[in-house]
Image: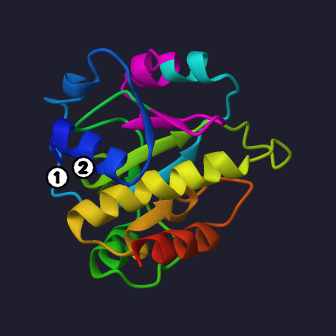
Amino acid sequence: MSAGELLTALRAEGSTVVEVPGWRTHNRAGHGPWGPVHGVIVHHTATSGTDSTVRLCWNGTDALPGPLCHGVIGKDARVHLVGCGRANHAGGGDPDVLRAVVAEQRLPPPRRTGSDGNVHFYGFECVNLGNGADPWPEAQLEAVERAAAAVCRHHGWTERSVIGHLEWRPGKIDPRGFTMDRLRRRIRDRLG
């Protein structure tokens, strides 16, 4: 998706979008390929506070430069766009999981890290501490549903193209606080 297509798709799905200045060209171009894309990975940020999280996901860290996703979804349900193109969000993941996403089949458990997910997945970081106690407001869950459904609708994908980071890479726990099966059911119902 081009930046314009992503913005149009999100707004058409009813997302409230905040365009962080420069997001349309903010990416990791030159640090590996972008595409073909096959799905969406949902993360939690392990942070609190939308403004500071947006800055972190824009800038990244010394060890992992930004953007760290395509959009940051706050507890207030706004989607802050921070990147378009390759982003440092998925890292290495299981090639068998990638094959299942492409085929839109049930996911096997992730066992290895032989595929670069930054090539193949859009990423949405959701503001949440990820400790199992930080609440997920219904408005935020609906925003995650809308954003993932927007990307799926644009590409003609089903809900099976949406996975959690914990389903991609061994040892990851995000998103924590809801199940991906529940989110996929919501996306399936939205896609109709």
- Which element type, helix, strand or loop, lies under badge 2? helix
Question: Can see residue 174?
Answer: no
Of residues 16 and 59, the one nearer the viewer is: 16
Q: Quadrant of the C terminus?
A: bottom left
Give the residue pinned by disc 1. Answer: 35
Number of other residues with Cα within 10 Å of mark 1, as a class: few under 14, some 14 to 19, many 20 or more:
some
Quick check: can you spot residue 133?
A: yes
| Residue in the foreground of this view, choosing between 99 and 92 | 99
Q: In the picture, residue 156 is in which quadrant?
A: bottom left
Q: Earlier in the sequence, mark 1 or mark 2?
A: 1
Q: Is residue 67 left or right of residue 167?
A: left
Q: Which quadrant would residue 179 be assigned to in this image?
A: bottom right
**Start-end of magenta stretch:** 55-79
**CA gap, disc 1 to disc 2?**
5 Å
Looking at the rendered structure, the kind of residue marked 2 is Val
Outermost residue, right side: 133
- Closer-to-camera residue (16/165): 16
Q: Residue at x 26, y 16 (%)?
A: 22
Asked if the residue at tag 2 contacts the one at tag 1, i.e. Cβ–Cβ closer than 8 Å, the answer is: yes
Q: Secondary structure at mark 1?
A: loop
Residue drawn at the location 13% of the way across and 29% of the way down: 30
Work out whether residue 63 or residue 140 is closer to the camera in this orientation and state it: 140
In the image, taking residue 129 as reference, residue 107 lies left or right, namely: left
Identify the disc placed on residue 119: 2
| Disc number placed over residue 78 in the picture, else none | none
Instruction: Report x, y in % for residue 68.
Output: 42, 31
